[in-house]
Image (spheres, rainbow, N blue to C red):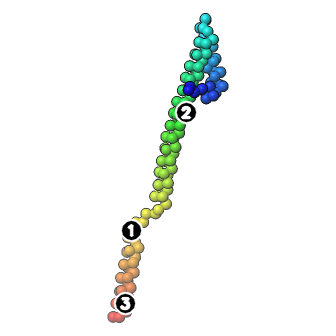
């Protein structure tokens, strides 16, 4: 059983293939030969469209993967920028020690 590809080919493709076959037609070429050439051109156009669609799909997949990776990187940088990094600063510790020392000195001088 042979599949009928006439339904799979659009009218534009048929017209385009027929126009190309007519342009390349040699003198003395029969209608049957022209029809066979037209069918070959239709198959070529169909194959070209299939490969172009496949390339386009592949490019879309790559583009989506890149876009997804960029979004993940942006989310990671947002998380790291929103978390403040705490550093041990010496001034509060100096003030604490000084205040306790002065308090101890006050208590020592009060009892003496």
Residue that mark 2 sits on? 53
Inter-mark Cα distance, 1 to 2 = 59 Å
Query: Dot 3 surroundings within 10 Å: few (below 14), some, or many (20 or more)?
Result: few
Inter-mark Cα distance, 2 to 3 = 88 Å
> Which quarter of the picture shows residue 27?
top right
Measured from the top left, where is residue 14 in percent x and y? 63, 22
Residue that mark 1 sits on? 88
- Any part of residue 20 in sight: no
Which disc is residue 100 wearing?
A: none
102 and 97: which one is in front? 97
Say which element carries label 1. Answer: loop
> Among all residues in the image, which is located at the extreme top?
28
Say which element carries label 3. Answer: helix
Quadrant where the C terminus sits is: bottom left
66 and 80: which one is in front? 66
Tell which circle, 2 or 3, labels the residue nearer the N-terminal end: 2
> Among all residues in the image, which is located at the extreme bottom?
111
Measured from the top left, where is residue 57 in percent x and y? 53, 37
Q: Nearer the viewer, mark 3 or mark 1?
A: 1
Say whether residue 9 is left or right of residue 106. right
Mark 3 and mark 1 residues within 8 Å of each other at the beta carbon? no
Q: Nearer the viewer, mark 1 or mark 2?
A: 2
Say whether residue 99 is left or right of residue 82. left
Q: Is residue 36 above or below residue 112?
A: above
Q: Nearer the viewer, mark 2 or mark 3?
A: 2
Tell which circle, 1 or 2, labels the residue nearer the N-terminal end: 2
Measured from the top left, where is residue 67 in percent x and y? 51, 45
Query: Dot 2 surroundings within 10 Å: few (below 14), some, or many (20 or more)?
Result: few
Residue that mark 3 sits on? 107
Quadrant where the N terminus sits is: top right
């Amino acid at each position: 059983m042979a599949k009928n590809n006439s339904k799979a080919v659009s009218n534009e493709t048929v017209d385009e293939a027929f126009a190309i076959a007519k342009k390349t037609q040699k003198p003395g070429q029969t209608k049957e030969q022209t029809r066979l050439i037209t069918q070959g051109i239709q198959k070529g156009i169909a194959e070209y469209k299939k490969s172009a669609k496949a390339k386009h799909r592949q490019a879309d997949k790559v583009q989506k993967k890149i876009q997804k990776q960029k979004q993940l990187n942006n989310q990671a940088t947002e998380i790291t920028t929103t978390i403040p990094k705490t550093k041990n600063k010496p001034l509060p510790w100096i003030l604490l020690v000084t205040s306790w020392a002065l308090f101890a000195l006050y208590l020592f001088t009060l009892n003496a």
